[in-house]
Amino acid sequence: MSLTLPAPGTVLKALDAIPDPGGAPADYDAVPILIVRSGDLVRAWINVCPHQGRPLCLPSGRTLVSEGRFIVCPFPGASFDLEPGACAGGPAGKSALKPAPIRIENGQVIAA
Ligand code: FES
């Protein structure tokens, strides 16, 4: 899979379209990106679990955030710390998510 990230300035999602806590896929097709939010903390990751390469959200886009800080993979449950993206438990070992740099501007999540 190509990991060419969106060009800086690309609008990825309206912030208020992302459940809090929760996540939603970016409105960007070239690379699967999941934007995850918990309060003021908003991060974006390549939407591929390092365990078996499956998405970190359900097909509906629903994303489980546990305890306000752990993204939980639905296939079947590795957890990743929302701040550094490192695996915090489950079958993904010492792996980590691949970040997609973002910034928030005027209520939009924008590639940085
Ligand atoms: S694919 Fe995510 S825990 Fe298996």
Image: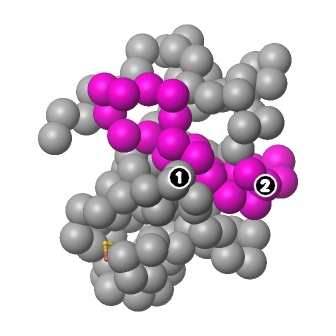
Residue at 44% x, 26% y is: 28
Residue type highlighted by circle 2: Asp
Instruction: Say what secondary structure mark 1 lies in.
Output: loop
Ligand 1 found in image quarter: bottom left
Residue 77's place in the image compared with 95, above or below, is below
| Residue under numbered circle 2 | 20
Q: Residue at x 62, y 29 (%)?
A: 13
Range shown magenta:
19-41
Residue type (three-letter) at the residue carrying disc 1: Gly
Quadrant where the N terminus is found in the figure: top left
Provide the residue designation for mark 1: 61
Q: Secondary structure at mark 2?
A: loop
Q: Residues within 10 Å of mark 1 (few under 14, many from 20)?
A: some
Give the quadrant of the C terminus.
top right
In this image, 66 relative to 92: left or right? right
Q: Nearer the viewer, mark 2 or mark 1?
A: 1
- In the image, farthest residue toward the left: 1
